[in-house]
Amino acid sequence: MLASAFRGSAEEAAGRHAQYPAAAGEEMEGYAVAVAAWLFGVNLTIVRGFSNAAGDRDHAGWRMDEALGRAAALVRGLAG
């Protein structure tokens, strides 16, 4: 199994967390951008706000506003 694969269920996520306990989360969308930046020697910072746990497909419980707010606050701190 590739390290860049996503988890479709809470059980799969728990297994991956056991393999990589220092990881805070999984990041799918920025992976290709990070690889391209590395290949071209470009510094990159990816800021993510986590709104739900891996495997949680019920959008009603996702905390999008909180996740976006925290990400925005971090970006403002980096820019200032």
Image (spheres, helix red, strand yellow):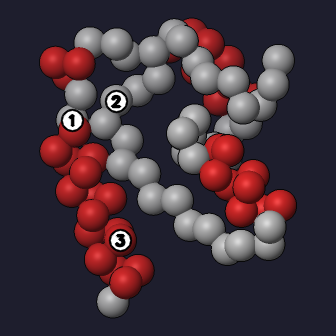
Q: According to the image, label 3 marks what residue?
A: 75
**In which quadrant of the rendered view does residue 34 lie?**
bottom right
In this rendering, would 41 be left or right of 23? right
Residue 50 in the image: state x and y as whole percent. Answer: 37, 41
| Precedes in sequence: disc 2 or disc 3 | 2
Q: Which residue does the numbered mark 1 point to in the structure image?
A: 63
> On the image, which quarter does residue 56 sit in?
top left
What crowding class fits label 2: few (fewer than 14 Cα within 10 Å), some (14-19), or many (20 or more)? some
Q: What is the tally of numbered marks visible in this picture?
A: 3
Residue 36 horizontal/vertical position (percent): 74, 55
Q: Position of residue 41 (x, y in %)?
A: 79, 72
Residue visible at 77% across and 31% down? 3
* Sequence-wise first label, 1 or 2: 2
Q: Are marks 1 and 2 in contact (CB under 8 Å)?
A: yes
Q: Position of residue 60 (x, y in %)?
A: 16, 18
| 43 relative to 9 in the view: left or right | right
How much space separates mark 1 and mark 3, taking CA atoms?
Answer: 19 Å
Residue 2's place in the image compared with 64, above or below, is above
Q: Is residue 60 visible?
A: yes
Amino acid carrying label 2: it is Asn
Q: CA distance from mark 1 to mark 2?
A: 7 Å
Write down the residue under mark 2: 52
Residue 14 seen in the current view: no
Foreground pick, 75 / 56: 75
- Give the residue displayed 71% in from the left and 62% down from the top: 37
Which is more N-terminal, label 3 or label 1? 1
**Secondary structure beneath label 2:** loop
Q: Is residue 74 above or below residue 57?
A: below
Q: Which residue corresponds to the image point at 81% horizontal and 25% vertical from the top-left?
A: 2
